Amino acid sequence: MIAPTSFFLDYGCHIRILEEARALLAQGLQVRIVTYYLGRNLPDLDIVRSAPTPWHSDYEVGSSRHKIAFDVLLSWKALWTALRWRPDIIHGHLHEGALIGKVLATLLRVPLVFDFQGSLTAEMLDHRFLKKDSFAYYWWRRLEERIVEMPDAIITSTVHSAELLADVFKRTENVYPLPDSVNLDFLFPTCITPEDRQHRRAKLGIPPERRIVVYLGLLADYQGVPQMLEAAASLRAQGEAVTFLVMGFPQVEHYRQYAHSLGLTAQDVIFTGKMPYEKIPAHLALGDVAVAPKISATEGSGKILNYMAMALPVVVYDTPVSREYLNNLGLYATPVGDADALARALRAILHDPAGAARLGVQLRERADKHFSWSRTGRQLLRVYEKLWQR
């Protein structure tokens, strides 16, 4: 696997890489992950890291010009590793991983699988790295089109992404939707006792009478974080006793200042910063309601599956990806990007605790039925075998 990111960090696409690798290991495969020099090692995974860049050692996430240098270093490490290890499959995560993987797959004469988690240029627009009608956008879009043509097979993190490949990039052959899944043995609502829940709430300074809305993920505008904070301010103005427990990074101080400018106190919004993956279940178990206000129309939203596994009712904007995960069990705010709509949806479910509990049970059952990593591992192995037979 080629992972052009600082694996492992405790968010979205890293969790997909982690759980796919573990699912393949459970199927009897050997998996080696080549990634950037930053990130957290995990004892059960074989991780190889590129050399560091001397001028920028604190890179976190998102589009950046520095990534070009990181990808050059990653390419050399991937080439060195591939020539020594001689893999049977090259599995490239994200567009850079597919581009590097194409060179290696051609050299070694093995199949290339592209793990597509959303449009490259759409993400660059979301991160405000490009402007839609610019000269740079034109060439990045041409590169993305070429990368989509390269692999022997593409797996996508959502059905919507497979439809995007067909509609926008005209790629339909050997495209397999393998939606993000969730580890139900790791995430479950009774992972802490009622006494422990009370103790943890008190430790965070949350009074017993307050309801808790949880958010887990990157802190970025395209994730809908500003709208979430504006919705929190609206609920406060309506006299609702609600605390938002916001778990994520980067830009914590930026959003803390924005929350303060909206009149929100430290009791209204608690920012935990980066949350280690191992501690996620216990913190999500504190929530009464979960929110995933992502605005991006092309990326997956794996946090929704974590919420479902924890039997939490989920308030989201009405996007195709959210519908794919939640079906008719989601609490949808419309229009997309409207903070008042988000506040209304949150207020409605917070005032219906019995309905929230029933909905949470149904969501966990849906996650169990449709979004299992062991099932994904078996499907991915079948894709590999089909490529080898061909």
Image (spheres, rainbow, N blue to C red):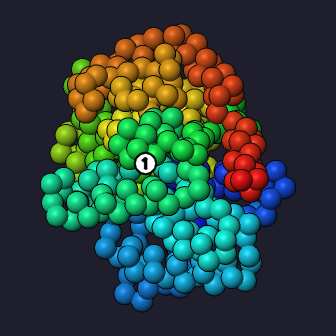
Q: Is any atom of residue 136 visible in this view?
A: yes
Measuring from the top left, give residue 334's x and y in whole percent: 28, 22
Measuring from the top left, give residue 338's x and y in whole percent: 23, 29
Foreground: 134 or 165?
A: 165
Q: Residue at x 71, y 53 (%)?
A: 390
The residue at which mark 1 appears reads as 118
Is the residue 328 above or below the residue 64 in the image? Answer: above
Which three-letter amino acid code belongs to the residue tagged 1?
Answer: Gly
Q: Is residue 115 left or right of residue 53?
A: right
Q: Residue at x 42, y 67 (%)?
A: 60
Is the residue 174 above or below the residue 191 in the image? Answer: below
Q: Residue at x 25, y 24 (%)?
A: 335
Quadrant in the picture for residue 129:
bottom left
Residue pushed farthest bottom? 54
Q: Is any atom of residue 42 visible in this view?
A: no
Foreground: 51 or 190?
A: 51
Foreground: 235 or 18?
A: 18
Residue pushed farthest front? 390
Is the residue 344 above or below the residue 236 in the image? Answer: above
Rendered-image quadrant of the N terminus? bottom right
Q: Residue at x 39, y 73 (%)?
A: 67
Q: In this view, does 282 lie to the left or right of 158?
A: right
Measuring from the top left, give residue 95's x and y in whole percent: 45, 61
Measuring from the top left, give residue 112's x and y in whole percent: 61, 61
At mark 1, the secondary structure is loop
Quadrant in the picture for residue 224:
top left
